[in-house]
Image (cartoon, grey):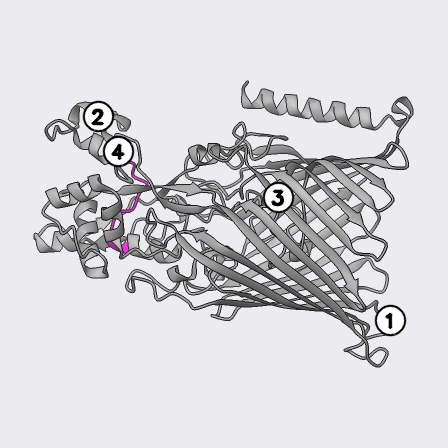
């Protein structure tokens, strides 16, 4: 079925379901239907383009010396094609959501959320850009989603709830939100994130509510008479969904080709399982969790391209015969694909982007050891095949292959994404302090969360076949407070948080890959990751206005500042204005998004 027909069919289907659910008399149901339609936009306030996209590549149209050309007296400079574009918008989209709550009986209720999202594609892109299709379930992210290049329609919620006394069960498609931290996800481990829309840069106080990837499953709990509760879930595995290449918020360098369809097929029938025990001991709230899951973020490594580049380029007859095997057949057994015009053109570009991706660009030795065909090609060209684990030797090998005269020219690298099973054990505590009434310490809530993941698998910064295996600890300490500073204004909500992780950063990247660039590789790495977050909300006396501020600070220097204001002139209309202001480099988490300073605006109508 063509994409326009799929979209039309999806809209008709949603309309029919909505119409049926909007007829409580006919179905003898107690229904509550609400929803909204909203225009969402983010306007760039700098000239920076996303450097992970072809149109924002830092080396577009920039002459760079090739080291090997200098050795042989060849023209020293190689210039990457200039694919540069200049965009005014990072986001221009329309969202609609419909929420239906149904009461069937005293014990049985249900809920459905329909979410429709359309990106208007007002950007100067590189080629035909696919915003939403991914190689998971029918080219979409989940079983209850239809999508195309510029739209997606899904059911993040479609479930039945059954309650009877202390017993509760939820069956169907659902999100599972554990933990109570802004920006940080310590106990919030059941679901991955869908980053296709606005990545990590949505309104911070919404705490990933729009990003958690739903899944089919069952979740139930039993509350004992002493107010302790035990809860468990079993849910179909769905991976985190990264933005596609050359989309505005893409974070994977487009010189890579990510192979993930086959690796997802290996685990598409896997389920995640978890249990949580919650209760009170006096004033102290406690919770304990144990989760067995496939890591939704995945871990990456080099893989064979499986592409004969001569055939792919339509020049199969020019494929040199090397005696029983052609050059193209040999290249298909390596991670590299030439002749695309979209790869890496020089060693300097290679090292710069390795640092930006938190990878070790200097350790080519690992790649040569993992791929015999790559080692054979390197040796056949008179290049070293041992000791290629430093900046100087790797530069020699890389520039020899990147040479359009002596080598193959630009190369795209193929990587695959593997989803490993892991077990996570955690504890959470919360306590409310009491002091002199109206003092700052009175009714201050203190929360602590901690998890340990034994033998967690991480991407090796060299993209080696053997993943890094480490036991990771993650902890957060949260101070939460409502404080009234004026008799005129409602109380101000404030939260201060600290996050510590022993092995990876905020986005799950191993710390060994941090702090490298084109002139300093291998990376220096970090011993640990620590970040501080602060957020506050201040409503106006009439509640027509609300002023927000969220700050995320990586102690190595990266920072995200998000001021915002919400205006609600009536029950039906909402206007939200905010900014994302970022600064960072290759030694902190925020460097990945430091290009994306923007002003966001959301215009909504609720019904």
Nearest to N terminus: mark 4 or mark 3:
3
Above or below, 595 against 158 in this view is: below
Residue 594 appears at what percent x and percent y?
Answer: 48, 59
Question: Label 2 crowding class (10 Å Cα cut-off): few <14, some 14-19, many 20+?
Answer: few
Q: Is residue 344 magenta?
A: yes
Q: CA distance from mark 3 to mark 1?
A: 49 Å
Q: Within the image, what quadrant is residue 237 found in?
A: top right
Q: Which region shows up in magenta?
A: 338-348
Q: Residue at x 20, y 34 (%)?
A: 330
- Which residue is at the front of the view, 48 or 20? 20
Residue hosting label 1: 488
The residue located at (12%, 49%) in the rendering is: 383
Q: Secondary structure at mark 3?
A: strand
Which residue in the protein does label 4 denote?
Answer: 332
Q: Is residue 190 something that shows in the picture?
A: yes
> Disc 4 or 1, which lies upstream in sequence?
4
Among the two numbered marks 2 and 4 on one chain, the one whose residue lies closer to the N terminus: 2
Say which residue appears at 67% left-offset and 55% top-offset. Answer: 577
Label 4 vs label 1: CA separation?
70 Å
Residues packed near mark 1 inside 10 Å, few (<14), some (14 to 19) or many (20 plus): few
* Secondary structure category for the residue under label 1: loop
Residue bearing mark 2: 315
Q: Which residue is mark 3?
A: 273
Q: Does the CB distance between marks 4 and 1 fall below 8 Å?
A: no
């Amino acid at each position: 079925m063509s994409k326009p027909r799929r979209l039309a069919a999806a809209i008709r289907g949603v309309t029919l379901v909505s119409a049926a659910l909007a007829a409580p008399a006919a179905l003898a149901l107690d229904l509550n239907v609400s929803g909204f339609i909203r225009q969402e936009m983010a306007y760039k306030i700098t000239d920076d383009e996303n450097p992970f996209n072809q149109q924002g590549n830092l080396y577009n149209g920039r002459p760079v010396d090739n080291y090997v050309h200098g050795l042989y007296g060849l023209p020293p400079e190689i210039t990457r094609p200039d694919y540069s574009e200049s965009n005014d918008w990072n986001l221009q989209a329309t969202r609609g959501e419909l929420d239906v709550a149904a009461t069937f009986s005293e014990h049985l209720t249900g809920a459905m959320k329909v979410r429709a999202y359309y990106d208007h594609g007002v950007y100067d892109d590189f080629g035909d850009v696919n915003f939403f299709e991914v190689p998971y379930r029918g080219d979409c992210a989940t079983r209850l989603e239809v999508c195309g290049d510029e739209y997606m329609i899904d059911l993040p919620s479609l479930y039945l709830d059954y309650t009877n006394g202390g017993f509760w069960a939820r069956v169907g498609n659902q999100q599972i939100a554990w933990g109570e931290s802004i920006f940080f996800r310590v106990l919030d481990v059941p679901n991955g994130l869908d980053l296709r829309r606005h990545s990590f840069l949505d309104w911070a106080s919404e705490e990933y509510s729009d990003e958690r990837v739903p899944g089919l499953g069952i979740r139930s709990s039993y509350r004992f008479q002493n107010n302790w509760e035990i809860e468990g879930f079993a849910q179909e595995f769905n991976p985190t969904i990264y933005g596609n290449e050359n989309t505005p918020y893409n974070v994977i360098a487009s010189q890579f080709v990510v192979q993930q369809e086959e690796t997802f097929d290996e685990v598409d029938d896997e389920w995640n399982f978890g249990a949580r025990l919650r209760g009170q001991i006096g004033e102290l709230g406690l919770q304990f969790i144990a989760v067995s899951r496939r890591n939704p973020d995945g871990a990456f490594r080099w893989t064979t391209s499986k592409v004969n580049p001569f055939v792919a380029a339509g020049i199969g007859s020019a494929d040199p015969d090397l005696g029983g095997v052609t050059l193209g057949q040999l290249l298909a057994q390596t991670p590299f694909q030439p002749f695309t015009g979209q790869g890496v053109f020089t060693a300097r570009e290679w090292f710069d982007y390795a640092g930006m991706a938190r990878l070790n660009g200097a350790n080519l030795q690992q790649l040569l050891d993992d791929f015999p065909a790559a080692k054979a090609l390197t040796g056949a060209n008179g290049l070293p095949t041992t000791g290629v684990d430093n900046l100087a030797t790797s530069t020699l090998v890389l520039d020899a292959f990147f040479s359009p005269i002596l080598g193959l020219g630009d190369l795209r690298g193929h990587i695959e994404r593997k989803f490993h099973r892991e077990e996570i054990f955690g504890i959470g505590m919360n306590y409310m302090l009491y002091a002199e009434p109206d003092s700052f310490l009175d009714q201050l809530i203190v929360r602590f969360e901690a998890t340990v993941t034994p033998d967690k698998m991480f991407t090796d910064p060299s993209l080696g076949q053997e993943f890094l295996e480490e036991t990771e600890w993650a902890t957060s300490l949260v101070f939460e407070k409502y404080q009234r500073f004026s008799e005129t204004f409602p109380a101000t909500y404030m939260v201060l948080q600290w996050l510590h992780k022993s092995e990876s950063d905020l986005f799950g990247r191993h710390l060994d890959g941090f702090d490298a660039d084109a002139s300093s590789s291998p990376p220096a790495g970090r011993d640990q990751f620590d970040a501080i977050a602060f957020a506050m909300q201040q409503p106006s006396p009439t509640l027509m206005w609300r002023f927000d501020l969220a700050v995320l600070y990586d102690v190595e220097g990266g920072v995200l500042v998000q001021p915002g204001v919400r205006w609600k002139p009536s029950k039906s209309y909402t206007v939200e204005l905010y900014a994302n202001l970022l600064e960072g480099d290759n030694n902190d988490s925020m460097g990945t998004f430091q290009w994306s300073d923007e002003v966001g605006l959301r215009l909504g109508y609720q019904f």
